[in-house]
Amino acid sequence: MEYSLIGVIVGLIMGLTGAGGALISIPLFLNFLHVSLKSATVLSLTAVLLGTLLNLISNKKKPDKKIAFLFTFFGSMSNYASLPLKNLLPDWSIAFLLAVIGIYSLFSIWKPLTPTKKANPGIMKTILTGLFLGVTTTLTGLGGGVLLVPILKSSFGKPFEEALPTSLLTIFII
């Protein structure tokens, strides 16, 4: 029953905001299933994977596949490289990182983001964003949507309608 409730909540958040739902699913796994923070981050990645697939299939707009695949490629490299770091970090440092990301996400929602008019964001910006997303995903269990949608809007000039499916595709693949 708890798994179904968590799945419904995470799916609704992903469909409405483009965020993967990990900021919601991690506390739900901690409180309902009483698992450790590190286990909750792994469970959240599984929930995010399934939820993004369903939301991506039902999304009517097309993602920017080039950006999504570059994020995925470089994010996967930093995912793999930062994996040993996750085992070394204490839970409080992961919780702190989650809090910082949550505050950034809330700030970006309260402060309306206006897309820039950049047609080509540049390969270095795309690579660095992918590397950052990979490390963040590994350490926190966040799929990237809580950061990726605001980044795509503000730094890559994507309207929300394109940022959402691009974020979902990136999250799903990575």
Image (cartoon, rainbow, N blue to C red):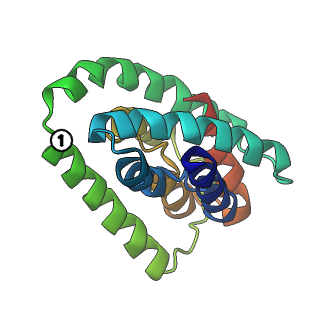
Front-lying residue, 150 or 125: 150
Q: Answer above or below: position of 93 versus 153.
A: above
Confirm whether residue 63 shows in the render: yes
* Residue at the spot of label 1: 91
Front-lying residue, 34 or 165: 34
Q: At which x and y percent is residue 54?
A: 76, 43
Front-lying residue, 112 or 33: 33
Classify residue 135 by image quadrant. top left
Residue at 36% from the left image edge and 32% from the top image edge: 138
Relative placement, left or right, of 9 versus 78 is right
Instruction: Assign a secondary structure to mark 1.
Output: helix
Front-lying residue, 19 or 129: 19
Which amino acid does the dot numbered 1 rest on?
Answer: Asp
Relative placement, left or right, of 73 versus 158 is left
Q: At which x and y percent is residue 68?
A: 62, 37
Q: Answer above or below: position of 8 versus 74.
A: below
